[in-house]
Image (cartoon, coloured by chain):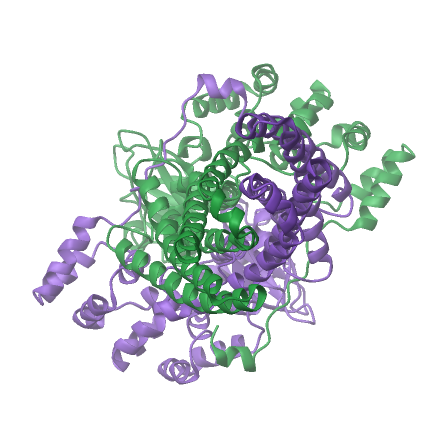
Chain colours: A purple, B green
């Protein structure tokens, strides 16, 4: 945003309550549950979208959730199951009666059923598969043969296609003759005689073109084909990068097997971001609805890694026990140097991790970025060195302590900029997720260097 | 992912090179630039999507970027400008000749031009507006009257609409009679006589229905209308929550003024996530392509806040200088307690910040979440207390130091769980972005409590 905008324009204000569940509506719903009034419950729930009902179920405690679901009974929609957070999905499935479950699942598209069953225990998975009609069950089982998190799991198998030599009139007549078309489709996929996709024609273009125009001539300029085994994260990246609306999926022989639409890619993009944020904070897979045992288990490993790195830093301090015994002020000031280094390192590594994820940090610009981070560390380090030098003098009298903390500050912020960029890049090169592991390494470096530089310089200059 | 999946299924592997720019292709492009060979440059650039060309320009240094753009000259596409990162967009605009710029901008849709000009300095903004045709310029200027980051800036003004009483046949005839239809459209918006949108009909449904069917009867079940002043983050949330493909935008009189499509919402969702990650790490608005001065300026405030909190923690330590002077081992061990608390607090606050952003953490479940976080802190704190108690005994002999560090660890991890949840919730209530400010507050709490508990207990038990 330029200065100009800052001064002359207004910004749209985020409305925190937009699309949030209305607390009064929830109160009315729970009143209906408390009074066991099914008619009232149905009329209160009627305006809610399945995604909102799923959010409501997530926010209730287990007792209220069970009562609501039991009263709601056969109104329970398959889409609510799709929208539910995994952590409480199994709980909800166990509450639904077999008949309600079967009915709910039968309404879903095959890709939504796949999404639903792939994370379930085997017995729940089988209960759902049995509820499906034969053809749907076969489609779901076929999808489950593709690797987890692959395009094959994400795609829908219903595709609208046309031979590449057709014209607009033939395509329109074909579409209007179909018994049933998929719920969501935006393109006709053009295929060659061996069923290999060669182009996409949007329905809008089709409607706006004369009947004798060849489909080939109005195909989209941007056309991407997705291999069925491609990771869903890469699929989401392609949709975001190339503004795709739908893309055909092909098997190892380049034959069309399905289509992925942007709404599915958007869900994946959202999940990938969530994963990145959680991994950067050392929270693993955790969400809001996991129980205490599960949450403790998820967070433990990251704290254990942090304990090891903290002990490493302590070992560095213990090398200087004699120095500290002579100047206790060192113990007072040393966490400042380590903390500033840790923060600066986290800044650098977050920018680097994010740039790696968006494929913007490459061999071509990595040295330029490292150089920038080091220089930024040098400039900020120098500013804070002057500030802390003055603080040191004012607080503890003599200038020597000021020199020590100033010099250590510059060293640690430069190292933070370097380590914060190099560590994620190296981790990515050796095949380790940089979002997952960078934090521990970078703070270890800044702790060790911070304590070593500060206490080491103090030992040299003060003793 | 269940245990079952872990054992029996494979996962799609992320291919880091998928959709990344091919280094050999870049080398060939730069060879063409070095040899000033325009034909070779054009043929090498031909297969690249505008988004890839923008990525390439971002990765080049300023010198190579200028040479490439000058040689590429009038092949430069408006879409490349749209895809460019803001930090180098102004630089690129200043390189383009006025004729090339005018040509490039004229190809763009009005919403893309708005996106392009809204962040520019006034003189560059005017240069681009002048290049537009009169009707386009009017459309862009109208959009610029809406607040920044609002639905009005995001929407396209070209809408395909139909009266609510039409049937399928009338709509199809109308569409086929149009001179020109928008590039991207997926729905026909049904409007009442006062131009208020009342429903959406997908083109797929239109193609698959008989001519005499009423449009009203095949309208989408999920239908959301977006106010023109709504924040774009809320718009992106609605698209993601309700799986919208396009949504009509209305003015204060509920009249249709434009339409937003999912690809624009996906870009916003991506930007919002980027912002959250950067804010959590205290990087502000920073990207990979800002220069050193700009990057230093962006990161400085966060480091300054951290310095203040670190000094606060040091003041706590200085209260116990006498204790430390007697037991230097305390100085060695104290950073461990603070560091573990800081990490646990960051885990809790990240989960809370994310849950607030997705509207999953509300008044209804906040106490349940706080209770969970505190109990998780208690359990993990107890485990690490035992570990550190043993380490303390082994490292420093006596059991007393072990008791002290164990007790301080439990206290600090419980406090971390509490503060990590309560602080973001309170910040959000008082209207401060929790992603922005939570980190500094939470680590201040865990540092102060960690040092105070550890040194205070040591003073009581060891002296």
Name the one closer to the observer, B54 or B10: B10
Which residue shows up at 45% across the image and 50% down it? B455
Give the vertical position of B51 relative to B87 (above or below): below
User: Seen in the image, is A183 located left or right of residue B301?
Assistant: left
Give the vertical position of A278 relative to B437 (above or below): below
Residue A111 in picture, x, y percent from top left: 46, 68
Q: Residue furthest right?
A: B35
User: Seen in the image, is B178 located left or right of residue A192?
Assistant: left
Which residue shows up at 70% across the image and 18% down it? B98
Residue A321 in picture, x, y percent from top left: 63, 51
Confirm whether residue A155 shows in the render: no
Confirm whether residue B463 shows in the render: yes
Residue B43 in picture, x, y percent from top left: 82, 42
Name the one closer to the observer, B32 or A396: A396
Residue A31 in picture, x, y percent from top left: 11, 59
- Examine the image and state in which quarter residue A306 appears: bottom right
Name the one closer to the observer, B10 or A225: B10
Which quadrant of the figure contains the C terminus of chain B? Answer: bottom left
- Examine the image and state in which quarter residue A121 appears: bottom left
Give the vertical position of B135 relative to B107 (above or below): above
Name the one closer to the observer, A319 or B43: A319
């Amino acid at each position: 945003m330029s200065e100009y905008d800052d001064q002359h324009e207004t910004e749209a204000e985020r409305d925190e309550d937009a699309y949030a569940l209305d607390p009064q509506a929830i109160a009315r719903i729970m009143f209906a549950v408390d009074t066991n009034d099914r008619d009232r419950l149905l009329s209160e729930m009627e305006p809610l979208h399945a995604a909102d009902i799923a959010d409501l179920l997530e926010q209730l405690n287990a007792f209220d959730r069970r009562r609501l679901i039991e009263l709601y009974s056969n109104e329970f929609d398959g889409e609510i199951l799709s929208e539910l957070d995994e952590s409480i999905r199994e709980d909800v499935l166990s509450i639904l009666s077999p008949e309600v479950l079967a009915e709910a699942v039968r309404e879903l598209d095959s890709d939504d059923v796949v999404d639903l069953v792939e994370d379930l225990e085997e017995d729940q998975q089988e209960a759902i598969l049995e509820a499906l009609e034969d053809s749907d069950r076969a489609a779901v089982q076929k999808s489950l043969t593709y690797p987890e998190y692959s395009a094959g799991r994400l795609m829908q198998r219903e595709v609208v296609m046309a031979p590449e030599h057709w014209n607009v009139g033939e395509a329109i007549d074909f579409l209007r003759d179909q018994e049933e078309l998929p719920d969501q489709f935006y393109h006709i996929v053009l295929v060659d005689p061996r069923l290999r996709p060669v182009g996409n024609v949007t329905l809008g273009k089709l409607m706006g073109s004369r009947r004798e125009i060849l489909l080939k001539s109005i195909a989209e300029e941007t056309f991407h084909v997705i291999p069925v085994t491609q990771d869903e994260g890469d699929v989401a990246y392609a949709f975001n990068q190339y503004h795709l609306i739908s893309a055909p999926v092909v098997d190892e022989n380049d034959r069309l097997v399905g289509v992925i639409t942007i709404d599915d890619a958007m869900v994946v993009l959202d999940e990938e971001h969530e994963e990145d944020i959680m991994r950067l904070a050392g929270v693993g897979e955790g969400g809001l609805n996991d129980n205490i045992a599960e949450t403790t288990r998820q967070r433990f490993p990251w704290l254990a890694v942090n304990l090891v790195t903290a002990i490493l830093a302590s070992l560095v301090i213990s090398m200087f026990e004699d120095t500290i015994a002579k100047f206790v002020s060192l113990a007072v000031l040393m966490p400042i140097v380590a903390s500033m280094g840790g923060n600066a390192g986290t800044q650098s590594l977050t920018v680097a991790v994010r740039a790696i994820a968006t494929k913007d940090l490459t061999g071509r610009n990595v040295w330029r970025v490292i150089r920038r981070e080091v220089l930024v560390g040098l400039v900020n380090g120098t500013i804070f060195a002057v500030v802390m030098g003055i603080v040191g003098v004012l607080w503890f009298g003599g200038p020597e302590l000021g020199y020590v903390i100033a010099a250590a500050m510059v060293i640690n912020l430069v190292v933070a900029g370097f380590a914060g960029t190099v560590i994620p890049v190296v981790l990515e090169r050796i095949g380790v997720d940089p979002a997952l592991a960078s934090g521990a390494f970078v703070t270890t470096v800044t702790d060790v260097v911070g304590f070593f530089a500060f206490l080491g310089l103090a030992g040299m200059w003060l003793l």
